[in-house]
Amino acid sequence: MKNRISLTRLCALLCAFLFLFSCSEKSEYMQIIPSDAAFVVTFDMKSLSKKGDVSEWIKSEKNASFFDAFGSGMGEGAVKLWEDIQEDPAASGLSFTDNWVCFGIGETNPVLCILTKVSDLDKWREVLKAMEAEGAATPVVKEGDIESSLIGQEVKCLFDKDRMLLVLGQDATNILESKTAAGWFTQKKENSLLSNEEFSAFLKERKDVNYWYRMSALPVFFRSAYTAYLPDGVLLGSLYSVGYCDFQKGKIEITSELRSDDKDSMKKLEEIFKMGGKQSGRFLKQIPANTLYTIGMNLDGQKLYKLLLALPGFTRTQMNAIQSEDAKKIINSIDGDLLLSVIGLSGSGSGFMGTAIPDVAVFAQVSDDYAVELIKRNLGILGVKEIGKNRYKLSTGETSIYFGLENKKNFFITNSAQVFENISNGMPESMANTPYASAFNKQSYSVIVNMKEGIDNIIPMVKGTYSSRQYAPLLAQCPFTYLVSSGSGVNGNIEIFMSDDSKNAFASILDWVTMMASQMM
């Protein structure tokens, strides 16, 4: 097939235009989604198109070479079609007034499906004929009301007068040949995912980008790890993860929730979150403001220990470790805020193959000094030195480890001399004084990722390599600065902050795409 790649590009760009312009609150055409779908992602692209000023972005001279490259190698007719679609996306015959939907099915060989509505069946047929003329698509075959074509070697396209479905994946051919996908076009609502009450509820709360995920569809490895920490009686098949993403000026906001259509399972899940309280953020003043990564939570160690003993998914080895006297006393001693922070790469120590050892700090409110005594007992032979009241130091080559108790109830352990020197009074410029500190206030758990600082740490590590010459400039222009996540119970919130707070986040991402395209072409 001649020019297959070029026309496959055209198909990809058709999907891109659909991605960028479609939007609706109607869900009837989603009746095509099978009831056993593993996940669904919907996009309100009319909203995103407006927020990102996409029509102007496409016409921008900065992107001219990027879009022209997709037309290289096409025949005259295909080039003309592509130009028409650039000028008026409706020339594709696809609807730009309805949501763009992705859904997945299968576990062993998952299949990705892309669904949209057809606005002009004849125009869509013309697109497929142009692809066929260029050798990028097979002739359209019609069976009943369903028509189909193979685009390239991997994309199966099915459509009727109202809907178009692209099927991708290792099992896509089997699905097409078995007429399974064709059956989705005619299935009744009770056989589709719309019959699921949780999914129907999810559709009513849509933002710019929205996802619905069946937790039982997790890949085997992750499913096994996830179920190991679920209490007995929680039905994995009843759990769903949902999220709503909104692109705002200067940031992306994502709200998430874990739901269940089984009341008993939901009740048991809510019990898990009662093993902790709300954070006070007391340890933030000990952490530098430019810390790379910080995770915090509030825990009742005694409740946590009881929960761990009741988990059915633990192996005998794991259970033996938990039931040891030391583990029992350590876990039971936790009584309040717990904070883990990866501060940065100091370069003061070297690990495997010369890589820098990150500076790390752990803080915990405790009810006794058992953790300190355990470290002294087990590592004393290596030369633990007392360097102050309830303060100890262990030197191991280029690295020193500091640990102890502050105010008798605040345990700490760190390899950062800077953190240790400011244990009592706090850092001169601490995370407590940043705008992101509020994420730790009265929340069950919190996570902060300093994305800009992380990139600044990564670039020197790869400097001089071939990859750095190609990708370092792209990383340096990354528009993301901070990721802040927090939540209580089954509800969570994520905010991703952008370097330019005067522009909508989606517009900033498109600008970055332009820059990447110009450097990679």
Image: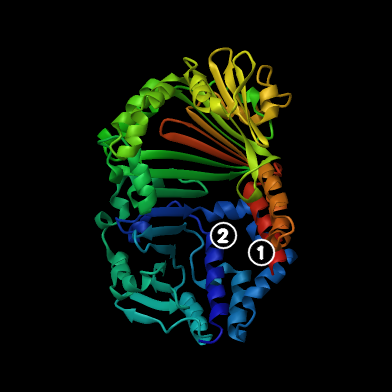
Q: Quadrant of residue 117?
A: bottom left
Q: Secondary structure at mark 2?
A: helix
Q: Position of residue 465 (x, y in %)?
A: 71, 60
Q: Position of residue 320 (x, y in %)?
A: 33, 33
Q: Position of residue 473 (x, y in %)?
A: 73, 56
Mark 1, Cα crowd under 10 Å, few <14 / some 14-19 / many 20+, is some
- Residue annotated with mark 2: 20
Q: Position of residue 57 (x, y in %)?
A: 68, 60
Lateral position of residue 389 relative to residue 486, left or right: right
Rendered position, 480 above or below 282 = below
Q: How many marks?
A: 2
> Could one spot residue 143 in this view of the protein?
yes
Tag on residue 228? none
- Residue annotated with mark 1: 58
Q: Nearer the viewer, residue 70 or 110?
A: 110
Q: Secondary structure at mark 1?
A: helix
The C terminus - image quarter: bottom right
- Identity of the residue drawn at 29% across and 46% down: 237
Disc 2 residue type (three-letter): Leu
Q: Quadrant of residue 192?
A: bottom left
Q: Looking at this view, name the residue that lies furthest to the front.
A: 381
For the residues labelled 2 and 1, say whether their Cβ atoms are less than 8 Å apart.
yes
Q: How is the image coloured?
A: rainbow
